[in-house]
Each structure stands twice: as structure tokens, then as C-alpha cells.
Image (cartoon, rainbow, N blue to C red):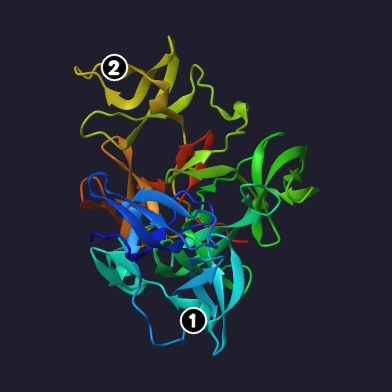
Amino acid sequence: MEFTTGDKVEVRSPDSSEEGIYYISASVVRSLPNAHRYTVSYPSNSNNLSETVDAARVRPLPPPFSSSSFRLHDCVDALLDGAWWPCVVVGPGSSTVEVCFPLRRQVVTFTSSQLRPHLEWLSHHWVLPQDQNQDIPNSIFDNGAEVEVAQLNDHLSPRLPSAWFPATVTKCIWDNYYLVNYSHVTTQEVVHLNHLRPCPCRASAVSFCINEPVEAFYQSGWHPGTVLKVFEGPVPKYAVLLPHLDKEMDFKQLHLRPRFDWLHDSWVPSSQKNPDAKIKFTKGMPVEVSSDEEGFKGAWFGATIIGPVGTSFCVEYHKLRTDDETALLQETIDPSHIRPVPPEIHCGPDPLRLLEEVDAYYNDAWWTGLVSKVVGKNRYVVYFRQWKEETEFEHDELRPHYDWVGGRWVRASLALEL
């Protein structure tokens, strides 16, 4: 859609705005079709009286609306400081309405005359948020997903998370707005995607070292901290400094976990990771080895370290043999394809659960799959994604699936119960 001089329009703020998206009413002063830009003038009470903007930021005025009745969790625009800001209704009323700004994490009361239904200008049509949601692909934050919500520190700029609180996604309201129910407190909140992350992998029962970055479960949330002291005993305990709370507290091992950061849709070890956590491969050490060779990707083969070869290591496989079958196969392997043996070799006596992630021993290697059927006592069918096939296994041919991440064994399929 093209605009001409004198047209009344709205101009969207730059996407990089830390306060979120907003819209300002303006008038077209000049059209620059070859540059795909417009010069627009703002009302006299605006800080910027005029500017030249990309055509993609300009849209017509939304159509007038006849109803001022807003329902719970409706997406609306609120008139604030001369601009229209998208927000969500959290307290509907006849004359005044409470709305929340998910990115700011603020609740503000407006009169009905200061609000309007939120509409999106897409393909030269006005679209309601609920209609737009039909085209949103499935994500890790679908309804029912277990997540963690950031508690923001108001004393830092930009506001950074000071703790993470377990919650469940109840509803995707629009675009990047999600309704969540907190797990350990009876409340719910509409939050922006920027303040959500999936639940981290659960670490196996590991000990922690002095100066190691951890997260401690305290007052219903996970708080970042650093181990100061280690108390020996039958039940491991640690003194942890929680800098955001300015406290030093003692925690049982059950209430601590290694600290990971959610970056670019994956978990990475904290930037302050303990350097001693890196594994040192030594002669005679049992390990597992992976391969990038076609047909073997995803498999882990048992082996023993023979010794270093430059920056790599020579290993001897436990089951694989040379072509003439006269000896066990030896190969030189890059360290990125070597890991220590997982903490548990076989599944315990308890039955496995449906859809539990496991490793299955098949063709002399451990392959990752999901329990798709419980056939009977101690027998299970496992589904392998890479082959899109199912195979039946005995209980003692399976083990819990662990990933070696940042010098720790972590298990994604289990949730920590507190």
C-alpha cells in the first residue's frame, strides 16, 4: 500500500527498542517511492517533529471500533505518552481496565477510552491477534510446556535475571506473549518470550567444587551463586554465596544444580565455569567414542584410552575388531568425540516409563531412543528417530540417557522434584 502527502498514518518504533514496540500517529509529508521511504511529521507534542522512515514501518490508521468492552487476556493498545503500546488485559472493568506490559513486567490501570483492540497490518489487511496465532508454528513453549521465568533485577541496566522460577505455559496469547502458571506459588503472569527459558537438563548426582558457579533453589526459585565451602559428611552440604540476595547460605546437594545459560536455543555452560571441570583423559581410562561416519552417527562405542597422540588419543575398542578379526581395533580419535563412561551403566530395577529417553545396546554400541511401548515385564520397544524404526529390548539392554555437557553428566528426561 502506498501513501501520498497528507495521509494520516501510524509509524512503528524500531524493533530494537528496549521498551518494546509502539505506534505513533503521524502525517505523510513526502513520499520517496524509489527509496521505499516516507518523510512523516508527528504531532507538536512529540519529541521528534519529523523524520524519514522505511516504508515497512508505516501503516494506515486502524479502523474505528464501537465496543469498549475488553475481556481477560485480550490484546489491546494503550495510549501512553502520545504513543500506542501493545499490552494484555489482566483486570477487565466497565470504566477502568488493568493491563500488563509483558516486556516491562508492569501492570497499569487505564480508562476504557485510552484503550483500543490490538490489530496487525499484514498483507494489506487488518488481522486480529487470535487469527495470527493460527500460523504460529509449534515451539518449545507450546501449551503445557514446563519452563522457567526470569525474575528481573530492577537495580541493573539493562534489567537482568536475578533468579528463575519454575512454571508451566498455559496459553500463547499473541506473538511473544505467554500466560504462565508458577509451579510453587499460586499465581499466574503474562510474560514476554525474552523472559522465558525451558527447564534446564537435570544433572546427575555430582559433587561441587569451591568457586564453582551453581544455582540454588530458595524461596521457590533458582538463584545464581558460587560455592564457598564444602562440608564433608554422609549428606553433602555446601555454603553458597547468593550475590543478588547478598546472602551466604548452606544448601544440601539436592537443592543445587550446575549453572547453564540458555543461548541461541541451546544450553551452554556458564561463562564462569570451573576450569577444573574439564575431563582429563589418561592411559587405561574407560571411555565412550562417537563417530561422524555415515551409519554410525549417534552411536557411542566402549573403548579404553591407550595414550595421547599429539592433541588426539589412541583408543582400543572393547567390541570392534580389525578386518581380519585377529585383534581389537585401535584408532586415533579427536577429543571432541571422546567422553567418560556415563554414571549408570544399566537401568535400575524400576520399570521404565513411556517416552522415557534411554540408550539401547545394539550392534556393539549405545544408541539413543525413546521408550514407545511397554511390552511386558522387563521388555520394551524403543523408537529410534534417525532410522524412524522400533526395536524390542530387554531391560538390561537399556540404560538412562545422559549427555556430557560442560564437564558434567546431565539428564534431560528427568525433572527435579522439590
- Name the front one of labels 1 and 2: 1
Q: Where is residue 299 in the image (x, y as percent from the top left)?
A: 31, 36
Please name the residue shown 57% across and 68% down the image.
Answer: 182
Mark 2, residues whose alpha carbon is within 10 Å: few (<14), some, or many (≥20)? few
Quarter in which the N terminus is drawn: bottom left
Mark 1, residues whose alpha carbon is within 10 Å: few (<14), some, or many (≥20)? some
Please identify the quarter of the rendering in which residue 269 is found: top right
Q: Which of marks 1 and 2 is nearer the N terminus?
A: 1
Q: Position of residue 163 (x, y in %)?
A: 64, 53
The amino acid pointed to by label 1 is Leu
| Label disc, if present, on residue 72 of the rendered structure | 1
Q: Where is residue 121 in the image (x, y as percent from the top left)?
A: 31, 65
| Label disc, if present, on residue 253 of the rendered structure | none
Name the residue furthest bottom: 94
Q: Which of 185 and 338 is in front in this view?
A: 185
Q: Give the secondary structure at mark 2.
A: loop
Q: Which of 253 and 379 is in front in this view?
A: 253
